[in-house]
Image (cartoon, helix red, strand yellow):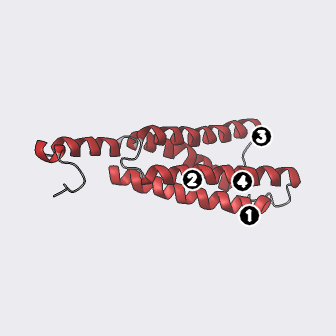
Amino acid sequence: MARALRMFAWLMGVACVAIGLFHVIGGNAAIPGESDAGATLDSLGRFFGAIFVGYGLVWLWAARQSPVPARVVRWLAAVFLLGGIGRIISLAVHGWPHPFQVTLTVIELAFPPIWFWLADADEHASAEQAQNLPRAEADTPSRPMDR
C-alpha cells in the first residue's frame, strides 16, 4: 500500500505539472472546443495552468518524503475533490460540457477517496518497520561511530 501511495503521488505530480504547463503554453487551445474563447478566458486558463503546476509540484514533493505525509495527501485530495465538485456545480448551472471535461469530472470525483484511503499507508509502514527493529538496532545511531 505504501508503494502504491508513493507511485500514485508521483504519477499525479507529473501529470499535473505536464497538464499545467500545457495550459500555460497553449492557453485557450489547451481547452477542448474553446480555442476561440477570447483574451479573458485565455488569461484565466494560463493563470490556472500555473496554479496546477504548483499543485503538481506539491504532489512530487510529497512523493519524495519519507514517509509520504498523510496530512498533505489528504489536503491535496480535498483540493482535487473540490475541483470535481466545482465541475458538478457548473454542470447543474450550465449543462453538460465537452465530453473530455465529463471524463475529468469522473476522475476528480473518483481519485480522492482512493487517496484518503491510502493517505497514511506509508506512515503506518514506517511505524511498523520501526517497531519491528530489534531494540539494539533502534538505538544505534544512523551514522558510523568514530573510532
Q: From what the image shows, is residue 36 above or below residue 115?
A: below
Alpha carbon separation for disc pair 1 and 3? 27 Å
> The disc labelled 1 sits on which kind of residue?
Ile
Can you say which quadrant of the picture contains the C terminus? bottom left
Q: Earlier in the sequence, mark 2 or mark 1?
A: 1
| Count of number-bearing discs | 4
Alpha carbon separation for disc pair 2 and 3? 28 Å
Q: Residue 94 carries which label?
A: 3
Which residue was labeled with disc 4? 98
Q: Which residue is drawn at 63% across and 59% down?
A: 19
Alpha carbon separation for disc pair 1 and 4? 21 Å
> The disc labelled 4 sits on which kind of residue?
His
Q: Earlier in the sequence, mark 1 or mark 4?
A: 1
- Which secondary structure, mark 2? helix
Q: Residue 25 carries which label?
A: 1
Q: Which of marks 1 and 3 is nearer the N terminus?
A: 1
Crowd band around label 4 with a 10 angstrom C-alpha radius: few (<14), some (14–19), many (20+): few
* Marks 4 and 2 in Cβ contact (< 8 Å): no
Alpha carbon separation for disc pair 4 and 3? 12 Å
Q: Which residue is drawn at 61% across and 62% down?
A: 18
> Relative to 140, is 52 on the left or the right?
right
> The disc labelled 2 sits on which kind of residue?
Gly
Q: Where is residue 83 in the image (x, y as percent from the top left)?
A: 63, 41
